């Protein structure tokens, strides 16, 4: 997750902004450099959560004038409504609010491209295929050396591995 102030470094410190009733009003994710620059008026270090609880903090970011005017031409959802609810009105909102959505995503994570992971099943399947290829080479070598007893064991193991692929 990126730092909410500089948007460059990885956030490593979490500030909890508290209201008058000591309830969490907002979470701020900051890098160590920005956390050291922030004026702290009152805080308590909670050893269990390793986080800082603040009483007061700086003013929230001002909204951009262009953002408040922007609205979808199909469903008439405004950017303000989208930011408040977090919900888009229709399919066309994605095109209309593309830059706004991109900015929101890049605030929270370093990239907007999903790299994904290889499913475990696919990884296992790939390993089984590799083992089958290796056993076929051993089987060919056993036949060339006329070692039929070992070849029959290899055939049994091949059949077992091939049954996993079905």
Image (cartoon, rainbow, N blue to C red):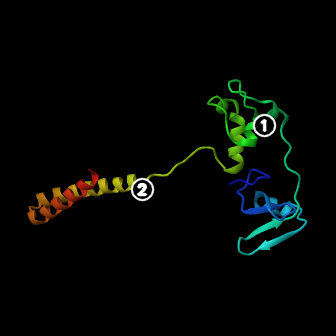
Q: Residue at x 88, y 55 (%)?
A: 58
Question: Number of marks in the image?
Answer: 2
Q: Residue at x 69, y 39 (%)?
A: 101
Q: Residues within 10 Å of mark 1 (few under 14, many from 20)?
A: some
Secondary structure under tag 1 reads helix
Left/right of residue 73 with respect to residue 44 in the rendered view: left
Q: Locate residue 148: give its quadrant.
A: bottom left
Left/right of residue 60 with respect to residue 107 in the rendered view: right
Which corner quadrant holds the N terminus?
Answer: bottom right
The spot of residue 113 in percent (x, y) is 59, 44
Q: Is residue 70 above or below residue 61?
A: above
Mark closer to the chain start, 1 or 2: 1
Left/right of residue 55 with respect to residue 47 in the rendered view: right
The spot of residue 75 in percent (x, y) is 69, 27
Q: Residues within 10 Å of mark 2 (few under 14, many from 20)?
A: few
Q: In front: 16, or 4? A: 16
Q: Return the residue at label 2.
A: 120
Q: In front: 140, or 51? A: 51
The spot of residue 68 in percent (x, y) is 81, 34
Taking the view exactly as shown, the residue that stands out farthest to the bottom is 47
Q: In front: 87, or 16? A: 87
Secondary structure under tag 2 reads helix
Q: Locate residue 90: give its quadrant.
A: top right
Q: Residue at x 85, y 34 (%)?
A: 65
In the picture, the disc for residue 80 is 1
Q: Is residue 144 above or below residue 50?
A: above
Taking the view exactly as shown, the residue that stands out farthest to the top is 73
* Tag nearer the camera, 1 or 2: 1
Gap between marks 1 and 2 measured at Cα: 42 Å
């Amino acid at each position: 997750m990126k730092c909410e102030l500089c948007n460059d470094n990885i956030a490593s410190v979490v500030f909890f902004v508290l209201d008058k009733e000591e309830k969490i009003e907002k979470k701020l994710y900051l890098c160590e450099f920005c956390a050291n620059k922030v004026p702290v008026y009152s805080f308590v270090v909670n050893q269990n959560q390793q986080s800082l609880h603040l009483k007061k903090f700086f003013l929230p970011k001002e909204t951009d004038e262009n953002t408040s005017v922007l609205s979808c031409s199909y469903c008439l959802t405004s950017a303000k409504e989208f930011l408040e609810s977090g919900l888009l009105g229709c399919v066309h909102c994605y095109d209309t609010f593309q830059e706004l959505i991109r900015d929101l995503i890049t605030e929270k994570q370093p990239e907007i491209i999903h790299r994904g992971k290889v499913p475990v099943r696919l990884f296992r399947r790939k390993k089984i295929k590799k083992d089958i290829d290796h056993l076929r080479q051993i089987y060919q070598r056993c036949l060339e050396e006329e070692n039929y007893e070992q070849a029959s064991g290899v055939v049994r193991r091949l059949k077992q591995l091939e049954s996993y692929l079905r």
